Image (cartoon, rainbow, N blue to C red):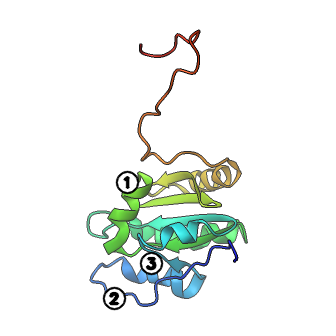
Amino acid sequence: MSTETVFKPLAVTPPSTDPAAPLVMRLVRDFGAALVDETSVADWTALPGDRVLLLAGDAVRFPEGQDVAAVLPELMKVFPQRFEVAAVPRDSEDAVARRYGSQRWPSLLFFRGGQYVTAIAGMQDWDVYLQGVDAALRMPPSRPPTIGIPVVSKTSSSDTGGCH
């Protein structure tokens, strides 16, 4: 039995009234981005290599999400073959955002080997994106912001760092 993760992208995307949908779908159609939802995102992030997940947000409330969807292919050109891209349909974004602690739209979430690395939130200047993506591709995985205050246990009687 193989332990290799098999990712199955969403087969059909329902029509959307979200004005950002055409730019997000352009990523899928023209640039090979996967389309993932709350049930498939873990399998996609677990695939090998660096992965970038776009949460574009509602185009009316967060119009800069359209800009990020347009900039992402340019970042792919600057960092060729360095990362794979996926987008989340609007109706799944809230669940995916909660899962990884994303609280701003738009956001680019970075993953490596199934582990969260970091996020770049909002629309950024080009130089900020270049520096942020470069740093994200070099930094180690970290805990997603959804994980609360770490629990610390007292490991020995001489440890006085606990609360009791």
Label 3 to label 1: alpha-carbon separation: 17 Å
Residue 72 seen in the figure? no
From the image, which quarter does the C terminus lie in?
top left
Residue sitting nearer the eye, 14 or 122: 14
| Amino acid type, mark 1 | Arg
Q: Dot 1: few (<14), some (14–19), or many (≥20) neighbours within 10 Å?
A: some
Residue sitting nearer the eye, 9 or 15: 9
From the image, which quarter does the N terminus lie in?
bottom right
Element type where label 1 sits in the image:
loop
Disc 1: which residue = 104
Q: Dot 2: few (<14), some (14–19), or many (≥20) neighbours within 10 Å?
A: few
Q: Earlier in the sequence, mark 2 or mark 1?
A: 2
Label 2 to label 1: alpha-carbon separation: 24 Å
Residue 153 seen in the figure? yes
Answer with the quarter of the image where residue 33 lies.
bottom right
- Residue 24's disc is 3
- Which residue lies at the image location 59% right of the left edge and 16% below the top edge? 156
| Amino acid type, mark 3 | Val
- Which residue lies at the image location 26% right of the left edge and 63% below the top edge? 61
Residue 28: where, in percent of width, then height?
Answer: 52, 83
| Amino acid type, mark 2 | Pro
Q: Earlier in the sequence, mark 3 or mark 1?
A: 3
